[in-house]
Amino acid sequence: MIIRFLAALFVLLTGLMSASLSAQLSSRYAFVAGHGEVSWHHTYDHNNYVARDWNNDGRHDVLSLTSVYSWNRDHSKVPLVQPHAFLSNSDGSYTHTWVGGAPIHTLTTEWYGDYFSKREIIVGHGNPFVDEVLQPFNCTGLVCVPFGPRAAMHHAITDDIDKDGKLDLITFKAGTSIFSNFQPGEWGHHPGNGMPQNLGVWSGNTGAVTGAFMDLDGDGYPEMITATHWNVTTHQLHGPGGGGAVPNGGVTVWKNHGGKDFTPIQQLPGGPGGRFATRLILRNGSDLILYGECGDDCDQNSWIKVYGAGVGSLHLKQMFNIGSPRGGGAKGHPPRLLDINGDGHKDLFVNHYDNYDGSVGTQHGGIWLNNGNGTFSRLKTPIFARIPKAHLKGMLAPVHANGDGRLDWIVIYQDGTFGTLLASGDGAVSTATSGSGVVAASFAGYVEAYGDLLAAYSAGAGQNKANWGKSHYCTYGLSEGRTYTGLSAASCLASISDSTSTSTSNAASVGDSGEDVVHERAMRFLPLSNWQLGFVEVEINQLADSLTNNADLLSFNQIQMTDLLSLNPDSAITLGFRANDSESMHHPAYGLRYGDTHLSFMTDSSLLGLHPGGLLHVKSPKTRYLGIRHSKTLGNWTTDGQITYGHAKGRGSYGYVRGVRDIHAMGFNIATRYRLNPDQQLLFSVSQPMRIERGGLVFDGVIGDLVPTGRQTDLTLGFTHHLNRASTIKTAFTYTTDRNHYQGQRNSQIMLTYSGRF
């Protein structure tokens, strides 16, 4: 009976899904066909796109700095290619053209990630795998022409390093060279790779393939921040104080001594995994944004790190995955900075080709919105789903197409056709929308119509019923299929009004020119009265990961249960403690044994083994664990099965957390062993580690979901051979899906172990 109950509970909990914390937005676009056709293999892989008004017509054109790898993914061949551009027309359409000038190699950009560029565009000219000395290119006049000193470069930027009021050229590849005022320097052998080249006024073995400059100590001279590739160089750079080689993708902060010399003062780690390279550093106000990837042919996600500037050093503010194709030689595009939602803060746009199943309609997944403090939250609401051929693979490029100040998009489809998505309405992106508004009583009635919502609101929502009802309906209700008279998706784009007023504080502007006032504007975010959610979303995600992937999470496999009181020859009351855990003496496990079936129960003063602190502090956490294990042997077959269930509770405290929505977690393991002979046996097992099935943290009545995106499943095939009484060899192959409960992450491993006594 207990087994059936737990199995039913397991099935129920695994089926539960929750809505995201992301703000929703909506869009409506008019499609204008482009002129010309794009050869697709020139556009989808590794391109750097930048927008700028090159023909002085008041509208943005887009230059695509095409990578050599998009032409030919055979890394041993480096053909010469040319950039291409989309030039604006008066009707909002674009004409595709190939840019003139000399053919070039892989390109990297001068500007610090700002998609809408106002400065010159200087491009590097190199490949981190090939030792070559080349010239940079200037694309200011659209036609890219070589200029300046020759150097080995994978990335080139400009900055005033020596505080003389003139820009200097800095190149990166296996090291750093600085050319004061773009003037050639001493010709010699670069210490980073040993190649002969112009060394400039300073050249050093930084191991860097990219870098940036920012004044961290307030002396007016910008410090140098460099980052390495996954295989830095044969001339391995040693960290500050000589403490070993720079880690793969690692970051070093260098003190600027008047633009004449640089010494390392801080060493920061690289990305996750062993082959990660920091490909690009962007500057966002007083923050630095690092984009990393593990190479063209690896199987791990790309990532973003956000570092805040401190006094003489950097500190990590945020790190998150941005996804990428897994293998196949296509990694996609580095991120770009632009203000998408019109709030005055730069957001991130990542245009990975295969990152979102290749569908243009799903490329909202490449938008990360600035939370207002320099951290970012991923946009999950589709905004391109209704455009023509949204199902096709393709890519997007943001533009201001027709000079009206509205954010438009160039869409390039897999079949080579392209066009412009012109924003409708007044085009301004804001926190609300035009329209007659929704009567407050409608959202209040929605709350009253559902008993669970009314109970949640009555428990202390912290705002009036209408506002709370709108927040719930737009964030959760729509996706859950909840309905109420007078409410629809459009209601989320309108302000709340009383029953006597038809105007709102967000009325349509004069520029609407007679359009229906209920038309959606170009992009609209829901009003977020719970603005602090954006600040802690990253911490919520990290907490959700820690709750189900931490060493302190209870497993009854860690507990040796012993009989405390025998009831009869086949049953007993049992007692146990966690091994090597003194705290477990305060939280013993109690159980019941009946034959080969063990039922265990335990409580501890934690939230699934953790004690959340800081902004997410939880008061009086408590978790109850229930486990059931059964073993059965028939002939040469032995089967063991175990299910563990956890129920965690807590209360709000001094942070942002107002309460804890009960957390339910579950995991199981089934293993079957077949004895071939007294010395050999086979193992077959399937397991799902402990995972949160339902639960969250409550912020002023809004729930921050803690449910992971996936469920890890491990499939194992093993073989054990007892060589003798003292020696044993074990081999095992394990295939893992949704590793660490991240959807889409896969892993496999083979293990060979030997144990014995000598």
Image (cartoon, grey):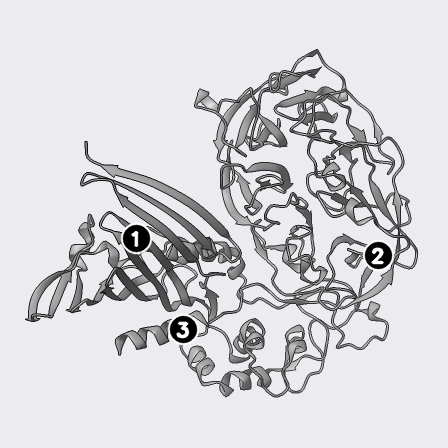
Q: Which mark is residue 417?
A: 2
Density class for disc 1 (Cα within 10 Å; few <14, some 14-19, many ≥20) is: some
Q: CA distance from mark 2 to mark 1?
A: 55 Å
Amino acid type assigned to the residue bearing label 3 in the image:
Val
Helix, strand, or loop for circle 3?
Answer: helix
Amino acid type assigned to the residue bearing label 1 in the image:
Asp
Q: Identify the residue at image location x=85%, y=30%.
A: 145
Choose between 205 and 38: the one closer to the eye: 38
Density class for disc 3 (Cα within 10 Å; few <14, some 14-19, many ≥20) is: few
Quadrant of res 547: bottom left
Q: Residue furthest front?
A: 677
Left or right: where 271 falls relative to 200: left
Q: Residue furthest right?
A: 90
Q: Do residues under tags 3 and 1 come within 8 Å of each other at their CB atoms?
A: no
In the rendered image, which residue does mark 1 sit on?
552
Q: Identify the residue at image location x=53%, y=22%.
A: 236
